[in-house]
Image (tube, rainbow, N blue to C red):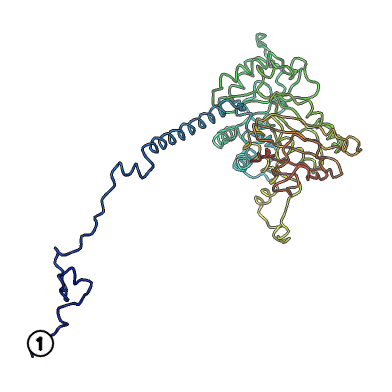
Amino acid sequence: MPLKVEGDPGYGSMVGPGLSGSLGGSETLPLLIPSDLEPDLKAWKPMTREQLEAAAGGPGWKRFRSRLVLLFWVAWLAMLGAAIVVIVQSPRPVATPLHWWQNKLFYRLQPVLFLDVNNTESSAISKVSDRLLYLQSLGVGVMILEGMFMNKSSPTNLTENNQQLGTLPQFHQLITDSNRAGVRVILDLCDLDLSSEPQFSNETVILAGGSGYVQDSLRYWLERGVSGFEICETDHTFSEKTLTKWRELVKEFSTDYNQRIVMVKEISDSSPALNMSKPTVNSSLVDLVLKSLLPQSSSPLSAAELTEVMETTLKTLQGEWPSWTVDGRVSCQLQKVLMVLMMTLPGTPVIRYGDEISQSVNISEYESTKDREHQDPAVKSKRSTWLFHSLIRARFREEALLYGTFTFLPFNSSAYTNSTATPPLAFLRSWGCSHFLVLFNLGSETHSLDPDWAGSLPEEGVYVTSTGLDRAGAVFLHSIKLQPQEAIVIKLFEARSEY
């Protein structure tokens, strides 16, 4: 059916009174407006340069902004230059390069202690080789072998070791394995009578001290890879001339990266010619002077006697580079105090076999008795060396403890001078802004530090280690209480600036 479109006023038209005027008075508006009848809308155009400058405040703003940026960079460069000048001109401690015998831990060992009483095939020398990994774990860098030769050895048979300890090839292998493991070997010759002259009819044989027999023996072991020799300071055995010849020999085998040394151990009744206080002896004849922190005694030293000896040592400590060992005897608790002293003093520490093991092993209270009895020996050894490991880590990681300055700190305040108790001891190791305070209390009473004792020291710090292994975290000096027979190592913090 066709649609009806005519006569329908609402179809195809729109009534718009607002548009009637613009369309000639027509009351109807087509749905599609012709393009020529569209309204003329205002077009958007970009601003010109003059318009932008006018909107930004005129041409002067650009010049001001450029000068402001230039001023910023000039000021930044000036501050950078001033910072560089301050860093360059500020005083800084310069570390003297250390020789290997100055930054290594020495470990004195007697292979005779490993003799097998059950007569198995393993020799004492082989057992020492088996302990090289353990020595590496301790941080040992030098091993001093004692008793490797018979006491009756003469200059003619110093190329043969004590056969009870093992064969000569086993000894050679021990030296090779030690060098591969990074543990140097020094042969101790203190117990040998090297001044005895071989009985030959040829009267042209010169004395043993400078004879070809001793020189050839030393040369033999240097060629095998030993790093040096240790002798004792005795006037009837060695003279200054003898040491001079020994030094000339070891220098032949020394290189920049592998120096060979001669160690001299101080003993009583020393020879005037070998007085170690002479700088010429320490610089031209021997590389390392071995001193004992305690004199040899038949009975263990008491806490008061040990305090007196330690105070004398700390007051008379000079600028030379000694090596420290312990010859005297003390109680088990005071042995740990001596370990702290040896590891924090300037110089090279020399410990004996077994010194690294504490006599009081800390076992967790959560372990049963059965667990303790069947515990692995390596675990027990690790627990018993906690103090030693903490000291050795601090010793060779902190510049202040390695080659920092030494300052003895006396307790002169009335809180200590008027007391009859054993006073505490203290000294400071400093390098730049790093400070380590070492405190000792060898008496039987607890000491609280007087705030006025060391007013110039930083007030804050953190515990590094202690003989009781029961101190940790931050600390204020005025709050420290020294327990009886205790030693503490504290790293001090410089005072913070207030802004």
Looking at the image, which residue is at 33% across and 44% down? 52
Q: Number of marks in the image?
A: 1
State the quadrant of the N terminus: bottom left
Query: In the visual, does 316 lie left or right of 150?
Result: right
Q: Could you say which is closer to the camera, residue 478 or residue 137?
A: 478
Residue plotted at (77% across, 35% down): 455
Instruction: Please name the residue shown 71% across and 41% down the image.
Output: 490
Q: Using residue 152 as the reference point, say whether residue 412 is left or right of it.
A: right
The percent coordinates of residue 395 (x first, y second) are 66, 37
353 displayed left or right of 258 = right
Q: Residues within 10 Å of mark 1 (few under 14, many from 20)?
A: few
Taking the view exactly as shown, the residue that stands out farthest to the left is: 2
| Image quadrant in which you'd find residue 120 | top right
Q: Which residue is mark 1?
A: 4
Above or below residue 461? Residue 260 is above
> Image quadrant for the C terminus?
top right
Name of the residue lying farthest toward the top: 204
Q: Nearer the viewer, residue 29 or 248?
A: 29
Q: Where in the figure is residue 399, as x and y percent of width and height?
A: 63, 34
Q: Quadrant of residue 90?
A: top right
Residue 286 position in % (x across, y down): 67, 20
Residue 14, quarter of the rendered image: bottom left
User: Which x, y percent locates residue 388?
Assistant: 69, 42
Amino acid type for the residue under numbered disc 1: Lys
Tag 1 secondary structure: loop
